[in-house]
């Protein structure tokens, strides 16, 4: 009898070992879209919510503070936008009332707030600027801030125009101009380096070049501006002179339609990526608006989303603010030009 129990125990341990090994193997399996047997175009890379997820540990003084006052965990709460700049990841987070800075190269983390530690109550837009700068739009304060490399505070910019509800923001490297979507005013403002107004695009309406609550922006290296025209359920494009250059999108609940469009971005192949919060996915289109590939569905597993918002693309790396899953998901485009 003892022998039988011993054999059974060994068999059980072996079964557990095999189960763990299979689980680990499955965990390492690549997650790609579209699924086999089609040629993969996008692969999942990783997700992160905390500095530790990126290999960033706490410094001596942070550990001492935790020892004296109790451990305080830094984590993403409600990400709205994300930007990558020189090995540093910035995440705009109204839940944390600031912008997370994850320095993966230097192994450091900080929560960036306004001057003197004042909260950023609604940071919803980010844009990568020149020389490591990052611009932040706070919709509640009605202000644009700049985060300079190494600084622990975001400084408010002096602009000629008073903003009502700034959301999306984009930077043009060639001219140094800053593009800001003022959602409540249904307009895109363009600012020079000194904060003076260079011009504005749009007014409320449904025609070409008109907006109905515009939100997120994306500026390509060639100077093309993409605007999420939210309640017109479309993406509009403008050329380097600010002239209307095209549009695509329609309201609906089918693949390729729009329900609640959020972030927009392009990759180096000319594909246009649009995040849709109610679809819990991002969709990839060609430059004419033809759907190429949807990625994601509602859930909490890898490659699944819950009300995603912002997107940022750096080379072939795709960063998505997975808002209500409290994380950033990272993907890679592997399909080449199509």
Image: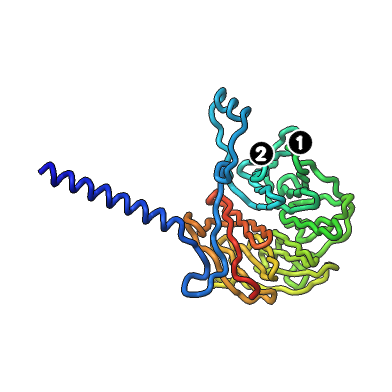
**Viewer-side residue, 238 vs 212:** 238
User: Pointer 2: residues within 10 angstroms few (<14), some, or many (20+)?
Assistant: some
**For mark 2, what is the residue?**
110
**Viewer-side residue, 113 vs 64:** 64
**Earlier along the polypeptide chain: callout 1 or callout 2?**
2
Residue 110 spot, x, y in % from top left: 66, 38
**Residue appearing at x 52%, y 68% in the figure:** 33
Q: Is residue 9 left or right of residue 192?
A: left
Identify the residue at the far left of this view. 1
Residue 233 spot, x, y in % from top left: 65, 68
**Residue 184 at least partly seen:** no
Q: Is residue 234 left or right of residue 53?
A: right
Residue 190 spot, x, y in % from top left: 83, 58
**Viewer-side residue, 315 vs 271:** 315
**Residue appearing at x 53%, y 51% in the figure:** 325
**Viewer-side residue, 31 vs 230:** 31
């Amino acid at each position: 009898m003892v022998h039988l129990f011993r054999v059974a125990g060994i068999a059980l341990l072996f079964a557990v070992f095999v189960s763990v090994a299979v689980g680990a193997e499955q965990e390492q399996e690549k997650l790609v879209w579209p699924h086999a047997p089609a040629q993969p175009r996008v692969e999942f890379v990783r997700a992160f919510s905390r500095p530790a997820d990126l290999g960033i540990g706490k410094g001596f003084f942070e550990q001492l503070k935790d020892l004296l006052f109790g451990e305080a965990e830094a984590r993403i709460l409600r990400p709205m936008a994300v930007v990558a700049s020189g090995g540093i990841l910035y995440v705009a987070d109204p839940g944390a009332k600031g912008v997370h800075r994850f320095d993966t190269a230097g192994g450091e983390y900080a929560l960036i707030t306004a001057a003197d530690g004042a909260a950023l109550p609604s940071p919803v837009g980010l844009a990568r600027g020149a020389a490591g700068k990052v611009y932040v739009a706070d919709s509640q304060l009605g202000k644009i801030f700049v985060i300079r490399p190494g600084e622990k505070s975001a400084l408010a910019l002096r602009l000629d125009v008073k903003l009502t509800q700034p959301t999306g923001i984009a930077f043009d490297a060639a001219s140094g101009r800053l593009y800001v979507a003022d959602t409540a005013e249904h307009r895109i403002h363009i600012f020079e380096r000194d904060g003076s107004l260079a011009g504005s695009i749009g007014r409320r309406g449904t025609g070409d070049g008109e907006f109905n609550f515009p939100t997120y922006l994306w500026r390509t290296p060639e100077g093309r501006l993409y605007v999420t025209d939210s309640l017109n359920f479309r993406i509009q494009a403008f050329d380097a002179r600010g002239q209307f250059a095209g549009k695509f999108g329609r309201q609906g609940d089918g693949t390729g339609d729009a329900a609640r469009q959020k972030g927009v971005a392009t990759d180096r192949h000319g594909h246009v990526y649009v995040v849709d919060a109610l679809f819990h996915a991002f969709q990839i289109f060609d430059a004419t608006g033809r759907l190429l590939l949807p990625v994601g569905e509602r859930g909490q597993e890898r490659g699944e989303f819950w009300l995603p918002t912002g997107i940022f693309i750096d080379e072939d790396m795709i960063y998505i603010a997975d808002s209500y899953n409290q994380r950033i998901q990272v993907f890679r485009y592997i399909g080449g030009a199509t």
